[in-house]
Image: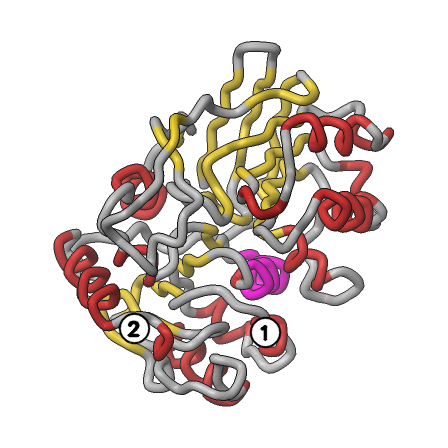
Amino acid sequence: MSMKAAKLQPGDEIRIISPSSSLAIIAEDQMKRAVTRLNALGFKVTFAANAYEKDVFDSSSVASRIGDIHAAFADPLVKGILTTLGGYNCNQLLRELDYDLIAAHPKRLCGYSDITALSGAIYAKTGLITYSGPHFSTFGMIHGFDYTLDYFKKMMTEDCTVAIEPSGQWSDDSWYLDQENRVFEPNSGPYAINGGEAEGLLIGGNLCTLNLLQGTEFMPSLQDAILFLEDDFESHPATFDRDLVSLIQQPGFEKVRGLVIGRFQRGSGMSRELLTTIIRSKKELARLPVIADVNFGHTSPIITFPVGGRAALKAGSGDIHLRIWE
């Protein structure tokens, strides 16, 4: 049974934590812009005590990160929690977390990429819905952020079913290095690999990070799931293929109801043809509706979706409908 924290309202405090990469690697002007943007939404922004701590891995000690997470959940003034950035080591934290504390003080935790490990574990252990969506650092983006902000607000502040429509444009540039010389291209929208209809429990995030939870107590159940999966430029077609097979081989995959795939970065080398070949070569996926190129993952802009929420998918040759809700 899923549990959800209250919707965010003007005046609410949002705590910034660094469970993966440190806030110290984010440019000062980007941070200031992110705070200004969140303030404009009516939120008060505070920073975890150890958010800026930085070690040789551009992260911080397990004790510091755990302390910041526990402090954020325990603080009655904090209603939302945004992660600084992704990285590689969020799964170091999972055995140290006080899940009873988290369950007793539900908050709206949002982040993506490596945060998939934290998000999935919290949902698996407590039933608390978590959110795959922009990091705190993402709010520092100058251009091309409107779509991301719109879907963040819909999921975090409005009590409604969210119909996912494609953005007009998308980008795969290193926007944080040069905010003014951006490269945008038209978005043709999602496409169907397998047709069909399904409704179910929304589970997923970054595929290679989700797979780190396999065989542990922190792996969410796949029963009756609509899986939302994405990966970054490091996941080449052969890598994505074997990571997908690993997930398919998990107990309970036979109860999965649908598959929604986020947009791949150019550097991955993935194409529509290759992805279609990968999906159609898996007999376990033949019964499932499968769509790809949805606005989430490591390109921009992105939607915010609830891990532990609900999704409904209808996929036809030229007619795709996707809805999410809590």
The region drawn magenta spans 116-127
On screen, residue 13 above or below 281 = below
SS category of the residue bearing label 1: loop
**Residue name at image x 23 percent, y 72 percent:** 28
Depth check: 29 or 120 in front?
Answer: 29
User: Residue 321: x percent and y percent?
Assistant: 50, 20
SS category of the residue bearing label 2: loop
Q: Is residue 26 visible?
A: yes
Q: How many marks?
A: 2
Depth check: 3 or 136 in front?
Answer: 136
249 inside magenta stretch = no
118 inside magenta stretch = yes
User: Residue 13: x percent and y percent?
Assistant: 23, 66
42 to the left or right of 134: left
**Residue 46 location, quadrant:** bottom left
Residue 76 is labelled as 2
Q: Nearer the viewer, mark 1 or mark 2?
A: 1
Here the colouring is secondary structure
Disc 1 designates what residue?
Answer: 89
Kindly identify the amino acid type of the residue bearing the numbered disc 1: Asn
